[in-house]
């Protein structure tokens, strides 16, 4: 089982949804970086459950405890160890799936691969794991503090924010519980999520991420292309079904004469359909991409499934689950983007 992410800046994690704790070790962080621990906790608070009426009501404080690698407020160059205790588990909510497989979850594949699984909240396959990634990303953001990373909810179901990112005021992302920087669209998204929740159902959406002040030259031209590593990172997030950068799938409809980014004399380009990356290498323009999240698989409706003996059984979700994962995914997208860029910045030195 692979539990590590990154090359030079490397995060290795541990823990299960209903275990004693989750946590990790960050290797490769340069020495002498002044860490704002309050900023790291703020990032965790953006991801934590129970923060609003449109997310899971599991009440986890998600308080991070650093165990090593920091002295007098600065990194020492040693491994940074950290832990987040689980305090609000309700494992009995999952007793009904002990011998059955939830549709579209990892239950079946995990059981077939390993022959044994922790069914409480999905165990190691739970999105609870992503809290570790947010810690790693919050540290990475402070290593590459000149690079600005902003993600936001750009759609919920068939409700889209129509503004191009250039017209978005990033300071408004945290102004509402769905993390959409357009107030009118945000209200529609929230109402839609509440409607879906009352039906015992779930809904998906997209997160858009914009990365600014990226220097020219990050990424490699063959298998470690910058966009390929960003794609790998995003597709590692629970419930992600798609990744596109720059013009994305819309670019497939265009002619080369329409799609080519014409150079200015300073090396910048008049348009940015390349999404800030050409030949796998950053070109100094804004990097922007979009990540698609499926509806959460656990729904509060009866569904047909199978048990370990391949018998057809009926199942209905129990417990506390997100009706839409997108608002809590915003800081996760930022965190993984930050770790990818930090890794490439260190590789470039």
Image: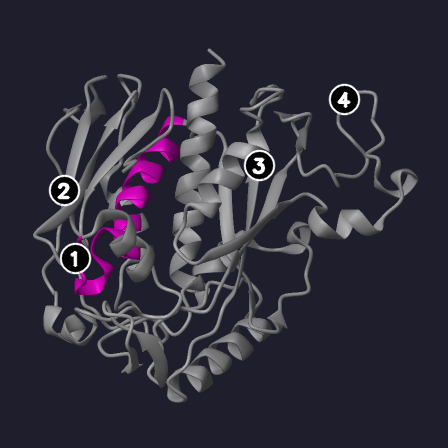
Residue 267: numbered disc: 4
Report the side of 209 relative to 135 (left or right).
Answer: right
Among the two numbered marks 2 and 4 on one chain, the one whose residue lies closer to the N terminus: 2
Residue 83: numbered disc: 2
* Mark 3 residue element: strand
Q: CA distance from mark 1 to mark 4?
A: 53 Å
Residue 335: numbered disc: none
At x 60% / y 73%, what residue is drawn?
Answer: 159
Q: Which residues are magenta?
A: 116-143
Contact (CB < 8 A) between labels 2 and 4? no
Q: Position of residue 323 (x, y in %)?
A: 38, 74
Q: CA distance from mark 1 to mark 2?
A: 20 Å
Residue 212: numbered disc: 3
Q: CA distance from mark 2 to mark 4?
A: 45 Å
* Mark 1 residue element: loop
Residue 137 lies in magenta, yes or no?
yes
Identify the residue position indicated by label 1 in the image: 118
Contact (CB < 8 A) between labels 4 and 3? no
Extreme residue toward the right, this view? 257
Q: Residues within 10 Å of mark 3 (few under 14, many from 20)?
A: some
Nearest-to-viewer mark from 3 and 2: 2
Q: Residues within 10 Å of mark 4 (few under 14, many from 20)?
A: few
Contact (CB < 8 A) between labels 3 and 2? no
């Amino acid at each position: 089982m692979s539990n590590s992410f990154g090359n030079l800046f490397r995060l290795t994690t541990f823990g299960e949804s209903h275990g004693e704790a989750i946590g990790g070790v960050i290797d490769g962080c340069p020495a002498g970086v002044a860490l704002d621990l309050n900023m790291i906790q703020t990032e965790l608070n953006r991801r934590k459950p129970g923060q609003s009426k449109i997310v899971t009501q599991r009440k986890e404080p998600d308080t991070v405890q650093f165990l090593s690698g920091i002295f007098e407020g600065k990194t020492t160059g040693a491994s940074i160890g950290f832990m987040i205790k689980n305090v609000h588990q309700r494992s009995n909510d999952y007793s009904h799936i002990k011998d059955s497989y939830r549709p579209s979850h990892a239950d079946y594949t995990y059981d077939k691969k390993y022959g044994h699984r922790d069914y409480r909240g999905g165990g190691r396959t739970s999105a609870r794991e992503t809290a570790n990634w947010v810690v790693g990303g919050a540290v990475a953001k402070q290593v590459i503090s000149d690079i600005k990373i902003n993600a936001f909810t750009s759609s919920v179901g068939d409700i889209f924010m129509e503004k191009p990112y250039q017209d978005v005021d990033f300071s408004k992302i945290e102004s509402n519980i769905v993390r959409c920087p357009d107030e009118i669209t945000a209200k529609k998204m929230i109402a839609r999520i509440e409607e879906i929740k009352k039906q015992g159902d779930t809904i998906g959406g997209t997160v858009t991420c914009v990365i600014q002040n990226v220097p020219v030259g990050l990424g490699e031209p063959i298998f470690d292309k910058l966009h390929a590593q960003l794609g790998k990172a995003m597709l590692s997030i629970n419930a992600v079904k798609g990744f596109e950068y720059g013009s994305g799938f819309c670019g497939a409809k265009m002619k080369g004469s329409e799609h080519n980014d014409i150079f200015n004399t300073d090396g910048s380009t008049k348009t940015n359909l390349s999404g800030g990356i050409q030949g796998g290498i950053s070109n100094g323009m804004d990097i922007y991409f979009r990540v698609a999240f499926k509806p959460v698989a656990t729904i509060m409706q009866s569904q047909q499934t199978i048990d370990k003996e391949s018998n057809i059984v009926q199942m209905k979700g129990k417990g506390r689950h997100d009706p839409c994962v997108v608002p809590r995914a915003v800081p996760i997208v930022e965190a993984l983007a930050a770790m990818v860029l930090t890794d490439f910045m260190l590789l470039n030195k």
